[in-house]
Structure formats: structure tokens, C-alpha cells
Amino acid sequence: MAIMLGNLNMSSIEARLGITLQEKDRNTLSSMRQDDAQNIQPGKWHCFDLPFMIMCGDLGTAQKVCEILRPYSNSMKTQLQISWQKGESENGMA
């Protein structure tokens, strides 16, 4: 079982990555942020400090987060993992 620590907000993520998001990107990501790391809901994400990772509630959210952050990737001063929790619908169970 992996141990993940932290609850980073957008300001902390931007500072750690050394980037400044456009306001529309920051607002979109902020609206999708979930404070509680337990049971991250579809359409939501939570950012851990250790490891530095955005955990998304579903694959679609992970893809959207990647799309938003991709244009900033060349300016990032460190790596950020983006992952998702595999939900029942992704296991073939509806």
C-alpha cells in the first residue's frame, strides 16, 4: 500500500512547477479540485505533495488535466505525475 501525503492547491502546484497558469486554466482546474483525498469523485482531482502527483477520479479527468497542463510542460521545473483511480465502469462493471 502506497503512502501519499499532502493537499496542494493551485497556487502551491504552480509554485512547485515554476509556472503561471492562464486564468482560465487555473479557474478550470480549481473548480475540479477536491480537498478530501478519500474516494476522489469522477470529474475531480486531488494533488499530493509526496509523491508530487495529481490523482484524478476517472480517466477522463486525467486526460483533461493533461490537456490543460501540456502547453506548460516545457517550462515546468520538475515532474508531475497524473494518475486516476480505476472506477467500476472502467472495470467493465456498470
Image: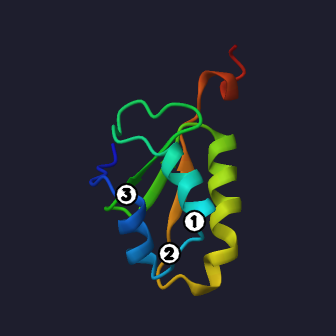
Q: Amino acid at mark 2?
A: Gln
Q: Name the quadrant of the C terminus.
A: top right
Q: How many C-alpha atoms fall within 10 Å of the one at disc 3: few (<14), some, or many (≥20)?
A: some
Q: Is residue 1 above or below residue 70?
A: above
Q: Which mark is residue 79?
A: 2
**What residue is rendered at 51% in x and 77% in y?**
20
Q: Amino acid at mark 1?
A: Glu
Considering only order in the chain, which callout, 1 or 3, is on the residue closer to the N terminus? 3
Q: Name the quadrant of the N terminus.
A: top left
Foreground disc of the pair 2, 3: 3
Q: Circles 1 and 2: CB distance less than 8 Å?
A: no
Considering only order in the chain, which callout, 2 or 1, is on the residue closer to the N terminus? 1
Which residue carries the number 3 mark?
A: 9
Q: Circles 3 and 1: CB distance less than 8 Å?
A: no
* SS for dot 2: loop
**What residue is rendered at 47% in x and 80% in y?**
78
**Residue 92: where, in percent of width, then height?**
72, 21
Q: Which mark is residue 5?
A: none
Considering only order in the chain, which callout, 3 or 2, is on the residue closer to the N terminus? 3
